[in-house]
Amino acid sequence: MADVRLIDVKKAFGAVEVLKGVDLEIADGEFVVFVGPSGCGKSTLLRTIAGLEEATTGDVWIGGRRVNALSPSDRGVAMVFQSYALYPHMTAYENMAFGLKLAKTDKGEIDRRVRAAAEALSITDYLDRKPKAMSGGQRQRVAIGRAIVREPQVFLFDEPLSNLDAALRVRMRYEFARLHGELKTTMIYVTHDQVEAMTLADRIVVLNGGRIEQVGAPMALYQHPANLFVAGFIGSPK
Ligand code: ADP
Ligand code: MG
């Protein structure tokens, strides 16, 4: 069980304050989508939740525990990036198994988890292929599989579909919705794409310049944007 609580999270790089006080509570099992213009701090916020960046002030709590008090392997989060970040010399299977091997997970257990993830993502036929012999969509599925096998309590996705073509993005959107329905894990998902945000989110968080402009269910934001900025982001067609 993992809810996520951000309490007045601020993050500065040198003199530049990127996150200017973010307060947010995400319920266990919720699908929350962060949207906002390029440079507004979405990736920084995600990395701070993952404990990859330490907040300058404020706290991040996951499942009632302070993230920065925990070693990375105990944080219960897994992050998927836009750029897949697969190991080129390893097969899909090896890419998914690698983190578990490092954690000294039993070989039988690794095999069980990799095959279950491959099944869920429809990539059982590609397990022996290396990334260069896979399509963009297949690569991104392997990257998602690598997160699934770790059985995290919270998934963090940073624009996971933005390198894919439009048709594949639509297909993968359904995959994310199905995956969330199946795993019922807390998911935090960053995107530029309004349709993705509207269709996937239980709640959308609109960020602007390191602050939250508005948080709400997709239809609530669409029908009652708090200001023109939110209206421009959620309301206007792409
Ligand atoms: P987004 O994901 O919304 O596009 P980012 O979180 O990547 O935004 O970046 C927000 C701001 O923080 C940008 O101005 C970026 O240049 C700056 N920034 C991000 N990471 C670093 C870093 N490690 N050092 C210095 N500045 C950074
Ligand atoms: Mg980003």
Image: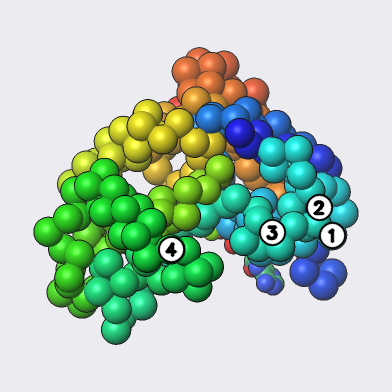
Q: Where is residue 39? Give x, y as percent.
A: 60, 58
Is 6 rendered above or below residue 67?
above
Amino acid type at circle 2 is: Lys
> Residue 106: which disc?
4
Which mark lies nearer to you, 1 or 3?
Answer: 3
Q: Residue furthest bottom?
A: 89
Amino acid type at circle 3 is: Gly
Q: Residues within 10 Å of mark 2 (few under 14, many from 20)?
A: many
> Residue 51: which disc?
3
Tell me the quarter of the picture where residue 204 sits. Answer: top right
Which mark lies nearer to you, 3 or 4?
Answer: 4
Q: Where is residue 112? Give x, y as percent.
A: 31, 53
Q: CA distance from mark 2 to mark 3?
A: 13 Å
Q: Residues within 10 Å of mark 4 (few under 14, many from 20)?
A: few
Q: CA distance from mark 1 to mark 4?
A: 38 Å
* Element class at badge 2: strand
Amino acid type at circle 4 is: Asp
Q: Which residue is mark 2?
A: 10
Is 52 rendered above or below residue 1?
below
